[in-house]
Image (tube, rainbow, N blue to C red):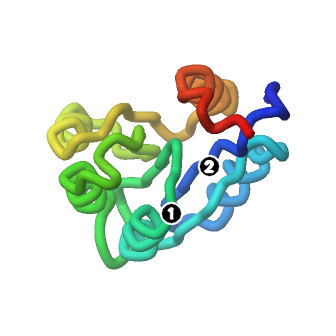
Amino acid sequence: MAGNSQAPFHILLVEDEPVIRELVRSMLSDGTVEVVCAATGLEGLKLAKSRPFQLILMDVVLPQLDGISVCRILKSDAATAGVPLYMLTAKAKRSDMESATQAGADGYIHKPFRGAELMSLVERLRDAAPKSELP
């Protein structure tokens, strides 16, 4: 991903499957993108509120607190409401997508996902990010 002069683009990945966490982290991390991972909904919620992220990727099925509930909480908090939040999940029924949209999700990425789809999303959001983050 281009643009090394930019401040790092911070992504929070909330995913309970270690293989998927590592796959997404290795696919997107390149020095200009930092991926911070959480394994549970509760851990993801705490991390999302602890520091700024430019993107949150979240599974729907999570231990402790499901992704739809975490999304609803984050989207109702002024400090995190503006952060793009995409559900990254195998739950592909129309009702699942409607639940995510009603909770405030900005998008829905189905598993198995294509790496190019994720990288394209990150590039699009980086390009749209305010350039005031430059040193």
Q: Where is residue 18 in the image (x, y as percent from the top left)?
A: 64, 67
Q: Which of marks 2 and 1 is in front?
A: 1
Q: SS of the residue at dot 2?
A: strand
Q: Which amino acid does label 2 sit on?
A: His
Q: Where is residue 49 in the image (x, y as percent from the top left)?
A: 40, 66
Left or right of residue 126: residue 107: left
Q: What residue type is labelled 1?
A: Arg
Left or right of residue 25: residue 44: left
Q: Where is residue 120 in the image (x, y as percent from the top left)?
A: 63, 23
Mark identifier at residue 51: 1
Mark identifier at residue 123: none
Residue behind mark 2: 10
Q: Residue at x 40, y 43 (%)?
A: 83
Left or right of residue 50: residue 107: left
Q: Which quadrant would the C terminus be assigned to in this image? A: top right
Q: Residues within 10 Å of mark 1 (few under 14, many from 20)?
A: few
Q: Where is residue 33 in the image (x, y as percent from the top left)?
A: 72, 44
Q: Which of 55 and 79 is in front in this view?
A: 79
The answer to whether residue 97 is visible is yes
Q: Quadrant of residue 44?
A: bottom left
Q: Which of marks 2 and 1 is nearer the N terminus?
A: 2
Q: Residue at x 62, y 61 (%)?
A: 36
The answer to whether residue 85 is visible is no
Q: Residue at x 80, y 27 (%)?
A: 3
Q: Residue at x 29, y 56 (%)?
A: 74
Real-space Cα distance between discs 2 and 1?
A: 10 Å
Q: Residues within 10 Å of mark 2 (few under 14, many from 20)?
A: many
Does 48 sit above or below residue 120?
below
| Pointer 2 with pointer 1, Cβ within 8 A | yes
Q: Which quadrant would the N terminus be assigned to in this image? A: top right
Does 79 sit above or below residue 91?
below
Q: In which quarter of the image is residue 90?
A: top left
